[in-house]
Amino acid sequence: FFSTAATDKMAIVSAGAWAELTAQVTALQQEVDTLKTAGNPMTNADLDTLWLMLCAIVVFFMQTGFTMLECGSCRAKNVVNIVFKNSMDACCAALSWWAIGWALAYGGDTVSGGRNVFIGGGEFFLVSSGHFPNTAFAGWFFQWAFAATTATIISGAVAERCAVGGYIIVSIAMTAVIYPVVVHWIWSGAGWLSAFCDTSAFGRVGTNGMIDFAGSGVVHLTGGVGAFVGALIIGPRRGRFGPAGESEEEKEFRETRYRPHNQVLLCTGTLILWLGWYGFNAGSTLMLSGNASLIAAKVCVTTTLAAGCGGITTVLMSRIFMGHFDVNYMMNGILGGLVSVTAPCSVVEPWAAAVIGAIGGVVFYGYARLLLKLKIDDVLCASGVHGACGIWGVIAVGLFCTKENLISAYGVSDPTVYGLFYGGGGEQLGVQLLGVFAIMVWVGLMSALVFGVLKVTGLLRVKAEEEDMGLDRSEHGGVGFQLGSRPGSASILKVGQVEPDV
């Protein structure tokens, strides 16, 4: 339809126009990119920081759950003391984690060469040899919430007879020294058990190091061992256990006197803790960008299944062996399932999480009954929920960890060492057991030192008459609940008078 001359002319014009159009499109794309950046300034780093801060807030809210659980589990005459101690845990942890804890756990100025496989050595009071990086503040905030949780675990074991001053010293020692060392071993970039350790620079035990995603060992076993040692050294509450040969009627009456005084508080506190565990476990991805959001979602699933199976298992066991559906055991079974899945939550399949939670319920129930046989008065059975179930959670990694999940959650390329049940050999299980042993030895010895010194100096336990009266009056000058009487009435007790065990 066109002549040859006309066609050549169109080709020349089209080539020129195409070059100009290409230049205009390129310029337009640059303007669009600029507008995107200006209108939506959130980067992956911003998203990760926001995620970490929100999860830290959720984890801190667990302090409310711990407080309500402990208040409900103890007698009404000690609730003010419990509220005070748990609040002091957060306050003491804030200062001790800032001054010392963070430095021993994660600190280590590369300029001063302060890092080693056992303990951190820099950034005390968040001051380094240079400018403390802004990117570290979210991590500090998140880890502070974990430190406060570890200290609060001990509170339930020594409740109703521990002196305020002595408890504050325990809380500071735990968050400033004992817990941070465990964190350094397993979660820092230099620890001898850490999966995040640069092996070429520092060295670590095992091919993968110890896998403890959110803290069955680091947080819960540490707190659980401290709770056991504390309960053992401080001794049982007055009248908690009877003499040998006590009749079943007398034993039942004694059990009734020391039962939780408020099941509603106990249950509400447990459900708040379950909620907080999503920040605890899913937040341990430390980010949302990349593949981390998918890992966080899966962690929420495994956490949920373990909690449900733990609660169902213990309530069924209470029905079979105790003759009734015990609410207290069910709540602790939920917590036992949660603790059990905290280490393996990112590296196991959902079915395995359900099994781990159910076994966690069995572990808790058996441990709780054993403590009663041994007459060790751990009021909330914190050493069972956090200690025994923490051990099981760490071990479960060595059994149920899959190759695919290890690649996804820890970035291990073509792993040859993983869960025993999946053909990964026994090395990972061995490393997990070594980690359990190391935590128990370190925390056990250090806790025994702290509690022992406090007991020898008379700072650990209140006087017998003060314990009988209730710590609300003896330590805090008032009561949390008015037990059927008006303030100022004749029912107000003086030192040495015994209030009914409610």
Image (cartoon, rainbow, N blue to C red):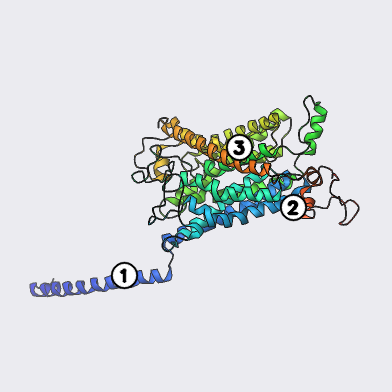
Question: Which quadrant would residue 263 be assigned to in this image?
Answer: top right
Q: CA distance from mark 3 to mark 2?
A: 30 Å
Quarter holding the N terminus? bottom left
In x, y percent, where is residue 136? 46, 58
Residue placed under numbered mark 2 in the picture: 80
Residue at the image position 51 percent from the left and 41 percent from the top: 343
Q: 10 Å neighbourhood of mark 1: few (<14), some, or many (≥20)?
A: few
Please indicate, yes or no, whether residue 272 appears anywhere in the rendered image. Answer: no
Identify the image quadrant of residue 266: top right
Residue 115, numbered label: none
Residue 290 horizontal side relative to residue 138, left or right: left
Which amino acid, mark 2?
A: Val
3 sits to left or right of 442: left
Disc 3 crowd rating (10 Å Cα; few below 14, some 14-19, many 20+) is many
Q: Residue furthest left?
A: 4
Q: Reading the chain from its start, which is encountered first: label 1 or label 2?
A: 1
Q: Which residue is mark 3?
A: 310
Residue 370 point in image, percent of width and height: 66, 30
Label 1's element? helix
Q: Nearer the viewer, residue 98 or 301?
A: 98
- Residue in view at x 50 percent, y 37 percent: 438
Which residue is under mark 1? 29
